Amino acid sequence: MYVKIDKESIEVIVLTATTKIVGTIYTLPQERLTDFMSESGSSNTLPMTDASIYTLVDGKFIAKTKFLSLNKKDVSIIFPSSELIK
């Protein structure tokens, strides 16, 4: 038997030293993105779904994957794509 934990999906843009990744992460309801990224005792990886990967320099498409696990230490910048000002 297990306890189901409801999660919220958030489409995010992640920048690493060499790539831009656009994908979906899952947080607890009402959890701030900064808290999610800095939780002590949590995993050192950032699981993402429906992730598209681009080169950071010229935006060239590299790959799209259903699942991606990114080391949180590699994340330079992360923000919800809904916060992007166009």
Image (cartoon, helix red, strand yellow):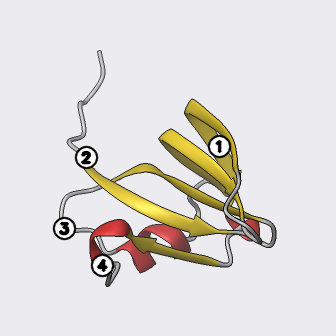
Tell me the element at label 4.
helix
Residue, x 64% and y 49% (percent of image)?
Answer: 53
Residue, x 59% and y 56% (percent of image)?
Answer: 21
Q: Which residue is mark 3?
A: 30
Tell me the element at label 2.
loop
First-in-chain label (2 vs 3): 2
First-in-chain label (1 vs 4): 1
Residue 42: % across, % down: 56, 58
Local crowd size for mark 2, using a 10 Å CA cut-off: few (<14), some (14–19), many (≥20): few
3 displayed left or right of 67:
left
19 displayed left or right of 82:
right
Which label was assigned to residue 69? 1
Which label was assigned to residue 83? 4
Amino acid type, residue under disc 3 in the picture:
Gln
Amino acid type, residue under disc 4 in the picture:
Glu
Residue, x 67% and y 70% (percent of image)?
Answer: 75
